[in-house]
Amino acid sequence: GGILRIYHELSLRNKKNQFKDCIVFSGDIVAHESILERLIEEWEKLQKTTEKNCYDALMSSLKLTEDRKDVLWVSDNREEVTGYGEKDFSEAKQKNWQPRLFSNHQILSHRNFSNLMKNDTELQIPKESSISLFYKNIIFSGQKIKHIDYSENYYWFNVGTHNEYIDC
C-alpha cells in the first residue's frame, strides 16, 4: 500500500499529479543506475506508439536463479508480464512462459490509481504489495504489462535484511 499512499499524498498536494505516471524503485534494493534510464526510455517509447493505452505498467525482472513461490511469469519472447506466483504454474508450462524474479523497478500508469483513489482526503490503504494491488488486477482485467530484462551486466542486491546488507 506504500505506493498508493505516496501517490495519493502527492495528488492531494497538486491535482495535476493524478495524471502523472509513477516510477517506483524499492527502498531496500541497491541497483545499477542505468536501469532507471532504460525504464524511462522504454516507457517514453511506449507512449509514442498507437499501443500506449494498451500498457498499464512496465516492469523489469532478473534471471531466476532458484525456484520461488513468488515467481514472475513473462511471455516466451519476454515482451510482456503474463502472471505471478505458483498458481499460474500450469498455465505457464502450457504457454511456455519464462520464470523471472521481480526486480522492484517499475513504472505504473496513472490509470492504475484512479479506481483505487477517492477525491476526498480519506483513503483506505490496503495492506497489499504492488503485485497484489496493481499487477494481478492489470493482468486479470486484460490490460498489458510491458516487460524488460534487467541486464545481467547490471548489479542488483536486495538489502532488506542485515545479512543481505553486509553481503552487498
Image (cartoon, helix red, strand yellow):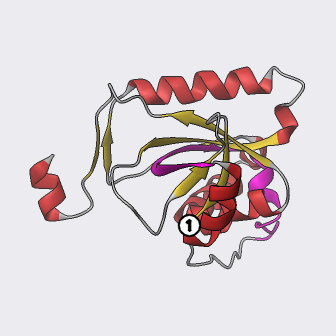
Q: Is residue 133 left or right of residue 104?
A: right
Alpha-carbon neighbours of circle 1 within 10 Å: few (<14), some, or many (≥20)?
some
Quadrant in which residue 9 is drawn: bottom right
Q: Residue at x 57, y 59 (%)?
A: 3
Q: Residue furthest right?
A: 50
Dot 1: element = loop
The answer to if 128 sits in the magenta stretch is no
Q: Residue furthest left?
A: 166
Q: Name the spot of residue 62 as percent of width and height, x first.
A: 43, 42
Q: Is 3 in front, or is 155?
A: 155
The answer to if 108 sits in the magenta stretch is yes
Q: Residue furthest front?
A: 94
Residue assigned mark 1? 85
Q: Is 158 in front, or is 113?
A: 158
Whether 55 is drawn above or below 89: the answer is: above
Q: Is residue 126 left or right of residue 48?
A: left
Quadrant in which residue 128 is drawn: bottom right
Q: Is residue 53 left or right of residue 6?
A: right
Q: Residue at x 9, y 53 (%)?
A: 166
Q: Name the kind of residue labelled 1 in the image.
A: Gly
Q: Name the spot of residue 89 as percent of width and height, x first.
A: 60, 65
Whether 62 is drawn above or below 69: the answer is: above
Q: Residue at x 11, y 50 (%)?
A: 167
Q: Name the spot of residue 16 as percent of width and height, x first.
A: 77, 43
- Quadrant housing the N terminus: bottom right
In magenta, the rendered stretch is 97-120
Q: Residue at x 28, y 33 (%)?
A: 155
Q: Is residue 27 left or right of residue 77?
A: left
Q: Name the spot of residue 7 as percent of width and height, x first.
A: 63, 55
